[in-house]
Image (spheres, rainbow, N blue to C red):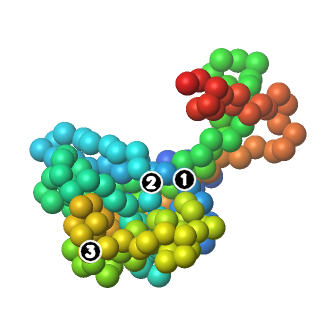
Amino acid sequence: MDMDKTKRTELRRKDRAVLDDSWIAAFLRRAPFMTVAFSDDNSPYVYPITFVYSEPDRAIYFHGTPHGTLRRLAERNTEVALTVAEMGRLLPSPIAMGFSVEFSSVVVYGTCTIITSFDEGSRALELMIAKYFPHLTPSEHYRPTTPAEFKATSVYKVAIEDWVGKRKRESDDFPGAITYPYNDNETS
């Protein structure tokens, strides 16, 4: 059963919906990675991956290998969903069912295409580098992508059709609220 596309951004908890496009765009600009989901023959596939949001294009760009499952999925089914999220404080409660966590998230629905134009693809790659390495300048700190290098990767563009934000925040003085104590460096 296909979900009605007009309902895919409706949230059950209206009090947590963020419909402010500027908040959603800012969240997409700062999020360090996303998870993009494809479907193929009723099998779901998800990929956590770095990306860049381009406001002028109302699109998200990412890249990967020119071979393999991700490329095959993008060629076969262009409809995708992606999400970015961040966790806030942990919220204790005197009862087990009351424990909770603060969070912010954005879900995007769109159409994924593989960029074949060197100009558009190299621009997308430069946008990604600028996001993650803003202190480096092309031609000064590194050589920009060459046509041969562009052919050795796949650059994907997700044209955004719909998006929705969701956020749960409590007051700053929430009793007993704590920050999740673990990060990647401490557990590896």
Alpha carbon separation for disc pair 2 and 1: 7 Å
Alpha carbon separation for disc pair 3 and 1: 27 Å
Question: Looking at the picture, does residue 135 appear above or below residue 81?
Answer: below
First in sequence, mark 3 or 1: give its number. 1
Amino acid type of the residue tagged 2 in the rendering = Thr
Secondary element at tag 2? loop
Corner quadrant of residue 141: bottom right
Crowd class of label 3 (few under 14; some 14 to 19; many from 20; radius 10 Å): few
65 relative position to 95: left or right: left
Residue 171's disc is: none
Find out whether the residues at labels 3 and 2 contact each other: C-beta distance under 8 Å: no
Secondary element at tag 1? loop
Crowd class of label 2 (few under 14; some 14 to 19; many from 20; radius 10 Å): some
Pinpoint residue 143: horizontal percent, then vertical percent.
43, 72
Question: Looking at the picture, does residue 134 appear above or below residue 71?
Answer: below
The residue that appears at 82% across and 28% down in the rendered structure is 176
The residue that appears at 60% across and 49% down in the rendered structure is 104
The residue that appears at 32% across and 49% down in the rendered structure is 37
Amino acid type of the residue tagged 1 in the rendering = Pro
Find out whether the residues at labels 2 and 1 contact each other: C-beta distance under 8 Å: yes
Crowd class of label 1 (few under 14; some 14 to 19; many from 20; radius 10 Å): some
Q: How many marks?
A: 3
Per the image, the residue denoted by label 3 is 147
Residue 50's disc is: 2
Residue 32's disc is: 1
Question: Looking at the picture, does residue 167 appear above or below residue 111?
Answer: above
Amino acid type of the residue tagged 3 in the rendering = Pro
